Image: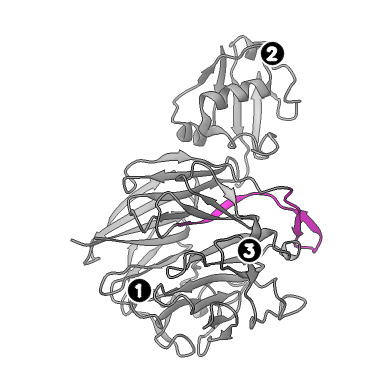
Amino acid sequence: MIRVVLPAHLKMHANVNGEVELEVDGAVTQRTVLDALERSYPVLQGAIRDYSTQRRRPFLRFFACERDLSHESPDAPLPDAVANGAQPFLIVGALAGG
Amino acid sequence: MSGVRILVGTRKGAFILESDGARKQWDIGGPYFAGWEIYHIKGSPVAPDRIYVSQSSSWFGQQIQRSSDGGESWEPVGNNFAYDGVPGTHQWYDGTPHPWEFKRVWHLEPSLTDYDAVYAGVEDAALFHTTNGGKSWQELSGLRGHGSGPQWQPGAGGMCLHTILLDPLDPKRMFIAISAAGAFRTDNGGETWRPINKGLKSEYIPDPTADVGHCVHRLALHPSRPNVLFMQKHWDVMRSNDAGDSWHEVSGNLPTDFGFVIDVHAHEPDTIYVVPIKSDSEHFPPDGQLRVWRSRTGGNEWEPLTKGLPQANCYVNVLRDAMAVDSLDSCGIYFGTTGGQVYASADGGDTWSAIVRDLPPVLSVEAQTLK
């Protein structure tokens, strides 16, 4: 079970409270986690990754285990603590706009 | 009993203001989609309880919401605005080629006949269409591909398609405007387009009378006479009597002819309204006095409307989609400001009062007349 924490605006948009829990088959990567998230919550398509490029939207960051994973390959394995559910995968709105 | 519903888009959410036909007491609903930028919210003229919302964010991209019960509940619908084919390039601010990139939906224009059909004007400038209530969107690429697209360039607010006018007498005819490309018309339902900018003169572009490149801020028409168009350009208020084939200036005695909004009285096709703004660098009314100017002669002769509007120390702006009219017997005029006020006049502009004063900066105002 993978735990994902959404920023407040996307919690409101997807109508969720607290963490999202997902099942991911196979390798646990940014791509497979986000694919699973969008399957469970189709309204998040385009809100985290650009529709056309599937790249992280520029004002969003991915954190886990006190590390910034935003610039890791989307196909790189996420930390074991994320893969086994000990730690959440955090989707964070960048501090932009004052 | 008749009533009015005012749909307000702001930098931090949507608001719905409702009143009966007297338009004296107002109920304020919202914020809806709190924290998101609402560039536009507009209801279907066929089914007024069907309302479409452009909800966007620099962080989380574009969303489209719709309501089928007048704003009591909402559902997100399709938000994939994919350009048709290889998008190509337009001009960047420095004149270099820049790839077309979707940023947001500026304007939603529901069909005059089908509540599931809507046009969407987007940044970077293009026109999209849905026929299934917003579930999916297709580009009408004849506009962007008609030939002059590589010469278009963004205005200060981005390269946006901000105005969509549907001709109520000819379902195949439509007018749109882009900052900073100009005005365009289709006569075949959006398949092909041509620029309609003859007569415009813009000193800030290399060829002031070029076919494209003009920073048109807003177009307006009266539904009974759609061949007559009014335009607030970056500078200049313009009029066309031939569906945009040619334009002539009608700024007349306005204190400044810079501005964003322009609209037409619901029952008097030659009564038009603008809000003059001091200049393109000083986006506030001249002398700190917020004045709507009305012409009853289709332009050239203007009178200031001040009763109920602040006449000192007022430095707000009124953005291009932030004025609307209702169609009650005594025509109501509404506009919103970047200071968060929404002003209303129930007597065609003679007197004004603020419905609400402290909203986030207002991006758009639409009026629905409810039977």
**Magenta region, residue range:** B86-110
In this orientation, which residue lies closer to the viewer: B155 or B306?
Answer: B155
Instruction: Give the residue displayed 47% in from the left and 69% down from the top.
Output: B170
Observer-side mark, 1 or 2, equals 1
Dot 1 or dot 3: first in sequence order is: 3
- Pointer 1 chain: B
Residue B103 magenta: yes
Q: Give yes or no for contact between labels 2 and 3 (Cβ–Cβ under 8 Å).
A: no
Where is residue B321? Give x, y as percent: 49, 64
Where is residue B332? Give x, y as percent: 32, 71
Q: Residues within 10 Å of mark 2 (few under 14, many from 20)?
A: some
Q: CA distance from mark 1 to mark 3?
A: 30 Å
Q: Which residue is mark 1?
A: B266
Image quadrant occupied by the N terminus of chain A: top right
Amino acid carrying mark 1 in the image: Ala
Where is residue B5? Give x, y as percent: 31, 58
In this orientation, which residue lies closer to the viewer: B196 or B357?
Answer: B196
Residue A24 showing in the rendered view = yes
Observer-side mark, 1 or 3, equals 3
Q: CA distance from mark 2 to mark 3?
A: 49 Å
Q: Residues within 10 Å of mark 1 (few under 14, many from 20)?
A: many
Residue found at the far right of this picture? B96
Callout 3 secondary element:
loop
Callout 2 secondary element:
loop
- Pointer 3 chain: B
Residue B300 magenta: no
The vertical placement of B284 against A83, above or below, is below
Residue found at the far top of this picture? A84
Q: Which residue is mark 3?
A: B192
- Pointer 2 chain: A
Render colour scheme: one colour
Q: Which residue is mark 2?
A: A27
